[in-house]
Image (cartoon, rainbow, N blue to C red):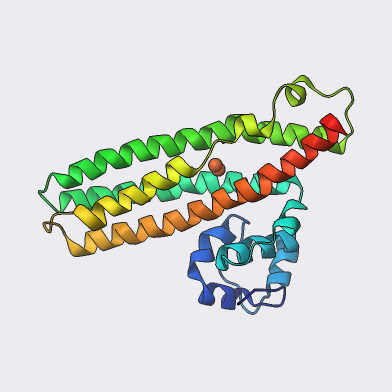
């Protein structure tokens, strides 16, 4: 199992997995590495190197998922990374997918692509609602809870007392399944009246987006939620 460590050259990291490019961008890392290693860049940019390594290795290798280590990082660090991913999804991935889908629709006269287009619109709305709910409810709650814990605030603020992470974090199954269905609609049922290149480019983008989203959901479900539940347990019951 290939794992990156602090001595890995940034250039080698990108050569071995170009899908990590948007992930490293979320840490404010941009190209032009010369001979610098991960440790050099993290030091230069003030990035927590252990968190960076855990995130990129978990993305790169799906068998590698250091749950305990990732849960040991502060909620602020985790939420900050998740927020940057949200903004990537909203500003980069979804608009890009839409442009590629429109190109595909324009390349064909078949009606099934219009069905796919309306299916995509519903999927996008559902995903954006999910993201907005996390941004407006779940994440502010998590940060408030972490602050309460760090500063040992007593008595507990009302918001902390009144809610729990489980009341905020929604399941990812629905949005995951819809994206799979979208891919499947195309792979299984598309009439052969379309442009090959436009279709492949669109599908490649969907597969890549799916991977990015699954990685994101895994951090929320397996890292953020259990970590927050641990803090809740400690300050509310302990
Ligand atoms: Fe999210
Ligand atoms: Fe989510």
Report x, y in % for residue 132: 52, 33
> Residue at coordinates 18% horizontally, 54% vertically from top-left?
190
105 on left or right of 148? left
Residue 229 showing in the rendered view:
yes
| Left or right, residue 114 beside residue 154 | left
Viewport quadrant of the N terminus: bottom right
- Residue 31 screen position, x and y as percent: 55, 68
Q: Residue at x 66, y 77 (%)?
A: 8
Q: Nearer the viewer, residue 198 or 69?
A: 69
Residue toward you, 190 or 80 = 190
Q: Is residue 119 above or below residue 51?
A: above
| Residue 46 visible in the current orientation | no
Residue 50 percent across, percent down from the top left = 74, 63
Residue name at image x 54 percent, y 72 percent? 14
The answer to whether 208 is drawn above or below residue 80 in the figure is below
Q: Is residue 211 left or right of residue 143?
A: left
Q: Pick whichever, 11 or 168, lies toward us.
A: 168
In this rendered view, identify the residue nearer to me: 72 or 7.
Answer: 72
Q: Is residue 30 above or below residue 33?
A: above
Res 44 quadrant in image = bottom right
In percent of width and height, residue 147 lies at 80, 35
Q: How many marks?
A: 0
Q: Quadrant of ligand 1?
A: top right
Residue drawn 24% across the image and 59% down it: 199
Q: Residue furthest front?
A: 237
* Image quadrant where one finds the C terminus: top right
């Amino acid at each position: 199992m290939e794992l990156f460590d602090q001595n890995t050259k940034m250039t080698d990291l990108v050569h071995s997995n170009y899908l990590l490019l948007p992930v490293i961008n979320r840490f404010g890392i941009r190209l032009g590495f010369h001979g610098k290693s991960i440790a050099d860049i993290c030091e230069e940019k003030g990035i927590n190197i252990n968190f960076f390594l855990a995130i990129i290795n978990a993305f790169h290798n799906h068998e590698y998922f250091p749950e305990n280590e990732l849960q040991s990082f502060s909620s602020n660090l985790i939420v900050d990374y998740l927020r940057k991913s949200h903004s990537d999804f909203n500003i980069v991935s979804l608009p890009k997918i839409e442009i590629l889908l429109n190109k595909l629709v324009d390349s064909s006269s078949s009606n099934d692509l219009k069905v796919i287009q309306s299916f995509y619109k519903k999927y996008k709305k559902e995903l954006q609602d999910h993201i907005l709910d996390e941004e407006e409810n779940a994440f502010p709650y998590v940060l408030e809870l972490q602050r309460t814990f760090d500063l040992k605030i007593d008595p507990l603020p009302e918001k902390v007392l009144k809610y729990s992470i489980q009341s905020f974090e929604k399941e990812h199954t629905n949005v995951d399944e819809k994206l799979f269905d979208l891919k499947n609609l195309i792979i299984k049922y598309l009439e052969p009246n379309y442009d090959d290149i436009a279709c492949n480019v669109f599908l490649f983008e969907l597969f890549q987006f799916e991977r990015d989203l699954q990685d994101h959901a895994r951090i929320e479900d397996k890292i953020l939620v259990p970590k927050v539940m641990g803090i809740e347990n400690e300050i509310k019951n302990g």
